[in-house]
Amino acid sequence: GNSVTQMEGPVTLSEEAFLTINCTYTATGYPSLFWYVQYPGEGLQLLLKATKADDKGSNKGFEATYRKETTSFHLEKGSVQVSDSAVYFCALWDAGGTSYGKLTFGQGTILTVHP
Amino acid sequence: NAGVTQTPKFQVLKTGQSMTLQCAQDMNHEYMSWYRQDPGMGLRLIHYSVGAGITDQGEVPNGYNVSRSTTEDFPLRLLSAAPSQTSVYFCASKRGGTDTQYFGPGTRLTVL
């Protein structure tokens, strides 16, 4: 079956530091890849997505590139802010021959940014 | 357009009690689902529905029931709560044929 593995957290950074959160996946088909973000006390919000190999998703200064050769979708940001403190989830959506498919999540990575 | 709404936001139950977590969406999405979020385990699918009158089990369905009488609503029922059901529950919806799900704000449930 499909699976998503994220780097262990928590990750603690100082403001303006560079961020990388690693994500690798296992899938039998041609999945879409997502990063969701969960701010404290809130639900999940879609941060960015990529639907095919070599696509780059980007939003709010974050970006991630769909790498089929390494089965990876690492999240990066050049300069983090305190407001980026949240839990980040990598996820994979596989249609599986249906119109609704299945969304598989990684375990989540807690990011804390200090001033 | 309120998106996906969930009630209540917080709930404390005693072991053996029953309750219903409410979920509604106003986007006319065919697909709705329930997840539970536990530390270090990401989100796991409990039940899902591809349309009114159609439901199916996800990865962790035991102890939960669902029904889908309308397109808008997808309640999750705990018949006899257990401490192992202490978790944060998220409802989500999406349009058929698309890949992006929209999540509600979550319900934090504690079972004593």
Image (cartoon, coloured by chain):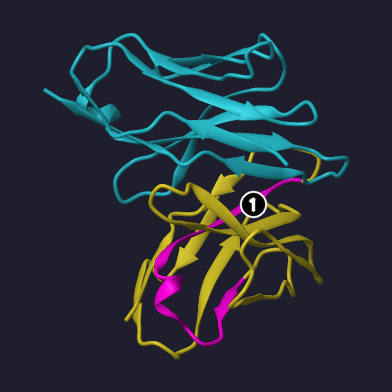
Residue at image location 69% in from the left, 38% down from the top: A2
Compared to B73, does A75 lie above or below?
above
Query: Which residue is nearer to you in this view: A106 or B35?
Result: A106
| Quarter of the image where the N terminus of chain A is located | top right
- In magenta segment, residue A22: no
Residue at image location 61% in from the left, 64% down from the top: B60
Asked whether residue B3 appears in the rendered view, the answer is: no
Please identify the quarter of the rendering in which residue A16 is found.
top left
- In this figure, which residue is indicated by the disc labeled 1? B93
Q: Amino acid at mark 1?
A: Ser
Q: Give the residues in magenta.
A: B75-95
Residue at image location 38% in from the left, 52% down from the top: B39
Compared to A76, does B72 lie above or below?
below
Rendering colour (chain B): yellow
Left or right of residue A112, residue A31 in this image: right
Query: Which residue is nearer to you in this view: A69 or A49?
Result: A69
Residue B103 percent location from the top left of the image:
53, 49
Residue B38 percent location from the top left of the image:
42, 56
Rendering colour (chain A): cyan
Left or right of residue A30, residue B43 in this image: left
- In magenta segment, residue B93: yes
Mark 1 burial class by Cα count in 10 Å: few <14, some 14-19, many 20+: many
* Chain under numbered label 1: B
Compared to A109, does B66 lie above or below?
below
Asked whether residue A13 appears in the rendered view, the answer is: yes
